[in-house]
């Protein structure tokens, strides 16, 4: 081998452009690192330098990928919601009655939502809602409306079978999600109840579902019809 050939062999090979898989892996890694800091320190307490250090990347790389700390924050919250809801999305239930089917979906959602991690996330989101109104709107569309669609499908099916009397299953689903899902999550975030789906929480949810159904079952009037 000539001297020139030896020199060429010793030169480091140029790295190619990151693959799509590499880019997705890096994004996931950054979001995981940022999630931990945001939930622990809040938006203002978690600096871009802290996020970059936690992810073991440069701040330049962080900004090149997301543009700003605010965009990282929004991506963290929406990624958490999307990841969990895709994992929890119901594929149907064999439960015999509407009450049991609603309990199934409530259990799925609240076993995720009534945890210390989500209580921390909710507190951070509440604190930043005025500063980032677009994030609040995205959370509403991205999370709340998906849960409403799940419940509306269950209610519409029960309505068609005569188990319920509903003029507007979507409106009824909004009331159900607010009563059974949003209210206990908000209580946990505010420290009014423990962030755990324990026996007390299950009893409260069961009574909420019974109350909802009592207003929506067929009767002489229109039931839950408005």
Image (cartoon, helix red, strand yellow):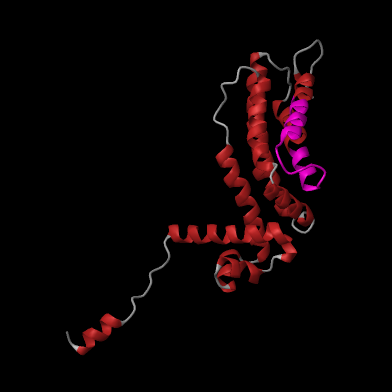
Determine whether 191 is above or below 67 in the image.
above
Determine whether 215 is above or below 134 in the image.
above
Instruction: Specify the principal SS of the magenta part.
Output: helix
Where residue 160 sits, quadrant-wise, is: top right
Classify the position of the N terminus by image quarter.
Answer: bottom left
Which residue lies at the image location 65% right of the left edge and 37% below the top edge?
Answer: 109
Q: Is residue 31 left or right of residue 133?
A: left
Determine whether 159 is above or below 66 in the image.
above
Seen as rendered, the residue at the extreme top is 220
205 or 216: nearer the viewer: 205
16 or 207: nearer the viewer: 207
Q: Is residue 65 left or right of residue 98?
A: left
The reply to whether the magenta stretch includes residue 197 is yes
Seen as rendered, the residue at the extreme left is 1
10 or 224: nearer the viewer: 10
Which residue lies at the image location 38% right of the left edge and 72% below the top edge?
Answer: 15
| Region in magenta | 182-209
Classify the position of the C terminus by image quarter.
Answer: top right
Q: Is residue 56 left or right of residue 208?
A: left
Q: Is residue 52 left or right of residue 6?
A: right
Q: Position of residue 115 (x, y in %)?
A: 69, 45
The reply to whether the magenta stretch includes residue 223 is no
Seen as rendered, the residue at the extreme bottom is 3
Q: Position of residue 21 (x, y in %)?
A: 44, 57
């Amino acid at each position: 081998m000539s001297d020139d050939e030896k020199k060429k062999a010793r030169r480091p090979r140029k790295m190619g452009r990151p693959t799509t898989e590499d880019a997705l892996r890096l994004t996931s890694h950054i979001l995981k690192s940022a999630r931990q800091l945001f939930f622990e320190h809040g938006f203002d307490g978690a600096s871009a330098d802290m996020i970059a250090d936690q992810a073991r990347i440069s701040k330049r790389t962080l900004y090149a990928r997301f543009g700003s700390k605010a965009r990282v924050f929004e991506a963290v919250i929406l990624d958490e919601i999307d990841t969990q809801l895709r994992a929890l999305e119901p594929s149907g239930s064999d439960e015999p009655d509407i009450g049991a089917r609603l309990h199934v979906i409530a259990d799925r959602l609240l076993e995720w939502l009534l945890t210390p991690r989500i209580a921390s996330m909710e507190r951070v989101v509440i604190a930043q809602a005025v500063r980032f109104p677009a994030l609040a709107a995205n959370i509403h569309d991205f999370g709340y409306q998906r849960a409403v669609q799940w419940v509306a499908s269950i209610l519409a099916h029960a309505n068609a079978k005569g188990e319920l009397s509903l003029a507007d299953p979507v409106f009824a689903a909004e009331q159900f999600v607010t009563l059974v899902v949003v209210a206990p999550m908000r209580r946990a975030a505010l420290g009014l109840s423990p962030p755990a789906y324990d026996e007390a929480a299950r009893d409260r949810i069961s009574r909420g579902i019974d109350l909802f159904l009592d207003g929506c079952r067929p009767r002489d009037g229109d039931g839950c019809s408005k």
